[in-house]
Image (cartoon, helix red, strand yellow):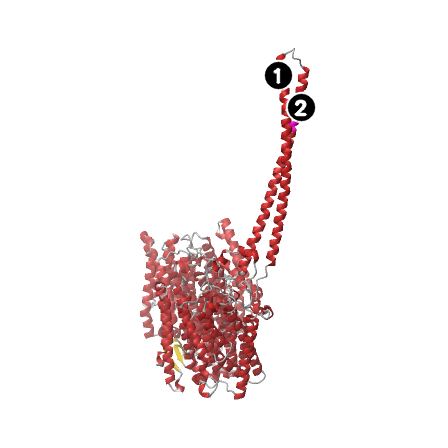
Amino acid sequence: MQLLAQQAVQGVIPDVAWSLIAPFVVLAVGGILLITITSVVPALRFNGFPAGFTILTAGVSAAFLIPVWNRVTDDGPQSVVGGALAIDHFSLYSWGVICLAVFGVGALLDGYLRREGLDGPEWYVLMLMSASGGMLLVAAEDLILTFLGLEILSIAVYVLAGLHLRRSDSQEAAFKYFVLGALSSAVFLYGIALVYGATGSTSLSVIAGARADNPAGLNPLENSSMMLVGMAMILVGFAFKVSAVPFHMWTPDVYQGSPSPVVAFMASAVKAAGFAGLIRVFWQGFGWYFEDWRAPMIVLAAASLLVGSFLALPQTNVKRMLAYSSIAHAGFMLTAVQAIASDDTEVSVLAAEALLFYLLAYTIMVVGTFGVITLVGAGADGRGDGAHSLDDYVGLARSRPLLAGMMAVLLFSQAGIPFTSGFLAKFRVIAAAADSGSYVLAGIAMLTAVVAAVLYLRIVVSMFLASGPVVAHAATDAAVDDEADTEDGAGAGDDHGDDEPVDGPEVAMPRPAVLAIFVAAAATIALGILPIVDRGLLTDAATALVALK
Amino acid sequence: MVEAVWLIPAFPLVGFTLLMVFGRRLGEPIAGWVATLAAAGSFVSTVVVFFGLVALDIEERFHIQTIFTWISSGSFTVDIGLLADPLSITMCLFITGVGTLIHLYSIGYMHGDPNFAKFFVYLNLFIASMLLLVLGDNLLLTFLGWEGVGACSYLLISFWFDQGDEGTANAGAGKKAFVTNRIGDFGFMLATFLIFVELGSINYDDILTRSSELGSQTATLIVVLFLLAATGKSAQLPLFVWLPDAMAGPTPVSALIHAATMVTSGVFLLTRLNPVLAEAESWSLGLIAWVGALTALFAATVAVGQTDIKKVLAYSTVSQLGYLFLAVGVGAYVAAIFHMVTHAFFKALLFLGSGSVIHGLHEEQDMRRMGGLRAFMPVTAFTFIIGWLAIAGVPPFSGFWSKDEILLYAWDSGGVSGPALWAIGLVTALLTAFYMTRQVILTFFGRSRYHDPTKEEIRDAMVDRLEGAKGEVEQALAARAAAEEAAEKATADIDKRQEALDKAQVALLEATEAVEGSSEEDDAKAHQKLVKALDKATKAVPKAETALAKAQDKAGSEAAAIGDAADAVIAAEGRVLSVENEVRAVPRFPRRVTATTEPIELGPLGDHLPERWHHRQDTTPHESPATMTVPLMILALAATVAGGLNLPFTKDLHFLEHWLEPSLFGHEAKLSAGAGTKWALAIIAIAVGAIAIFAAFRVYLRGRVDPNRIELDGMVNAWWVDASYADFMGGPGRRMFDLAAWFDRTIIDGAVRGVATVSAATGSVLRALQPGFVRSYALGVGVGSILVMAWFVGRVF
């Protein structure tokens, strides 16, 4: 508000260091350009131009990150647009993750839209808009801008969720997502109002200063309770966005109903931006109150871990399974977030590294995973987005060994099998939780990692081992196990019932999507084996994040 | 030379990569040879490293080779590094040695399998994971290998997953192994976590040298958690259930998993961490010993009751692993490793021998259908007998020395529990000798039962014969029905004829009257006509009479036919009864057999045996090819002489003990027993073994005792432990799962389905969203918000 007030009074547009926010500008302008070009030249609306343009835009945006990163390394963190946006290693790292997501989802969308007969630029425009909103959210140093970013991010995704016009599932998902999202936005906004009421500012540094200047805290019974309730409401808003339990209920429905590439975007960019925004607001703005917000975050984390992994088990729809899995992953990331809240800077840095690595690793693997789901979802007809049952994956290893192999790598990574990025991500988070003294949460995280492995294994088993419908078999398997085979062992060797090998689904393999999935799988392994981003990138970003308080 | 340690896991890893990429193209048998060479290369490297270690001073025999830093997060780092010390190299020697032989054997065993190359991909990966498990220089790498062998065993056990119903069972067995091991894995993770929290490092170097910083309570907890992990991987009570089911996989897999490698990793882990064990309170060590002793006894009793040749060996493995735990629990690490090595030799020998038998008998695994095989497969029989002598504890075969040492240390551990553990071990030894003798007799001695009709074949013959007899009844019934129909027809015919006769007689009367009533004078022509008619009528009557008589005759004969047909029906029904009696009279297929068991007397049923029995009469059991028998011979040699590794007579002969010293940090238990006790215990053990073998001969070779009195139902069914797990999983466990499923189905899916139905009906999405439904989600958000806010507000006060 200070910023707005200044403008009102002085009528001065703040100095904008365009070169520093180039990555953001490229993305936002790219979206506007795309819709302009395609309106003027209708021939460019189809056949790969929008996808190519989007990927190019993301590439240019990512390329701009490098000089900006180096400049921040040299000159230190910058505050631009009148102190409303922070350009530091943390925001740049998060921007990079968002660019990666746009990159991957752009490649997935192309084949999907052509297959579904929905080709057109509006999907890409919305995605670019949403991503630029995400960039705004993670860099915002002012709660108004945070809210703006959050809404730009979300509204575009509400539309994307419902853009598969022929599927009523898709529109239903969009509607639910929108209604509940609006509710959480309202709560969020009310929280901002209360925080403003308590501190007299929406600027994160001023909010932090309100406490820092006065070690005794805000005026106890009035301002501080207002502040606390405001924080609570802002936490609720973020918790909804990152689908933490108990604000997760929309997730399975929306993931199941939305177009698969859009789900990839939701699970990657939206989630990553949500977490980055959450930690920026809570650490930079509310860092002094971390003892207040750490406990509810632990509870949210534990609940997300448990609900996500246990409720995933009985599912038979792969998208629904992965929706619950994404809730469990949110639990892991929250575990890292709460570990950042520590008095010990070293512990905070380790936890921040864990969170940032998790964001990167999860973004890559979830885009890849939903990429495979996008391709398999076409089903026998070659179009539609409905073949998401476990049975639709039976025999995939026979008909499309490469696709099944990549999917296995990505799922193993989600399960946290060693030598994949998922393992290192979980390992770091658990180590960070232990360092910060949250032993119970670390234990729960380990337990749920074990439980969730079963879920991913079910999909792998369908692809590689199952020779008939899995869902129907699940019940009979138990019966076979139970059979106390004491007398009838004889003669078993005589009659091998030679089942005809079941043919797997003949999945179409559009080249950009397969390439994106391949890159994701390869990156998943590379990140899991070599500490590629460890020294340098990750530490710099984590240090920048921790220094915000 | 020690620097070559990285080559040990590198060889199988390269083999794995090569085969994964080119395996299908290389095909059979080249893929198998590539894999075997990779394993052999690993073995050679291990030998090189071994001599390298020997050349070093004793204090320096702890070589860490860091390949690169894997995780580096603050002060905490985890390397991809290998630790070569006597313990790990000993493990590597027998893993790669036995592993190479198993690879070689598999070339013959897997001959003709459509997935030949894939099998070797898994085998090489398994070896690589196992080597990583023992060579890793930190707990995380060990855990990685731990998981790797688990995944490979899952893949290998369910290797034949696509074979119909049996395939489903195989996949089920793989799943069981996976789930059971996961329980143990959680223990591993928690224990690693505890060590990390306490020491800030998970490198063995730090753990082994700084174990005293742990404090006894933490150490105890760590030991108990690792014990949980080990009971899963090494199939001890209560997590042993997966191992017998794992018999579903191809035989070399059983050998690899059971004998040489995976199941010993629990014991390896506990031995590796011996300084931590030394810190722990003594009850945790007692727990290890008792888990081992009870498992040994339990599994040995179950082995007595098994009829599947591989299941006997599976339970035997569980039992022998129990000995290893017992040894670790009493601090006899050397004895544990010693027995691990000898067991690797003789159990691999026995498993591969049983595989050779199964192969030679065309996939027959039931010992009740074996017998007398030594005539057909001399090499297999000879080597199997050596394996038997080794495991039964007959001196001078290797098993005797290593088992005896465990029993000695158990006795020596003192207190009440020492002799108790020793006694349990002794009873187990007795049972071991007994069930192994039983197995050898049932498989290789006595009459060959291979050509005997099986239970299923007899049942088929019975069904065939009964159905034949029932067919006769039906035929007779049909004949009777036909006769009855004919009789009815005949009766109808009589009526018709009678009617015709009556008509003829009436016509005669009328004609007579007409003739009498007319006169020739009135109308000569008409009269003439009437006379002619009378004539005709007079002739018709006897004709009709004859026809009637004929019809009556026919009816009579048909009635007789009915009687005959009815008699035939009764006779056929009688025959059915007699066939039923005959079938009932066939003796029950014996559940337990001995070498003296005679084939079942089938009588006339013998002609009804199904095609596959006839087919089997044309085949005979055959000896396996050289790729299979050569490994058997090498292993037999090793199983004979491996006792020489650690002979008890003088200190100088304790080669293994001296060799392992640097890895044990002085935590090996010290023997207090004198030479007299040693000799006495050894003589008791030999005597007990001899008694058991003698008893088994009486029961199974001579048939003097009814085996039903020995093989109790409980033994056959593994004391129903597995069944009760299944009941639990089917009962309360299943219900918990169902509850989660129900919650999702009813509350969440139900709502979704409801929406979908309505939306399909109305075609309007907006109307489809029942207000209560989104509201319930919103309610969730609301309640959550209130809870979160309540917490924050609570902080004010």
* Residue B291 in picture, x, y percent from top left: 54, 77
Mark 1 and mark 2 lie on one chain; the one further toward the N terminus is 2
Circle 2: residue type: Val
To which residue does mark 2 refer? B506
Residue B47 in the magenta stretch? The answer is: no
**How many discs mark residues in the rendered view?**
2
Q: Name the kind of residue labelled 1 in the image.
A: Lys
Residue under label 1, please give it.
Answer: B529
Closest to the observer: B277 or A223? Answer: B277
Indicate the position of residue A513 as horizontal and vertical percent values.
36, 59
Q: Main secondary structure of the magenta part?
A: helix
| Residue B716 relative to residue B764: left or right | right
Label 2 resides on the chain identified as B
Magenta span: B499-510
Question: Local crowd at mark 1 within 10 Å, few (<14), some, or many (≥20)?
Answer: few
Secondary structure state at the residue bearing disc 1: helix
Distance in Å between CA atoms under marks 1 and 2:
18 Å
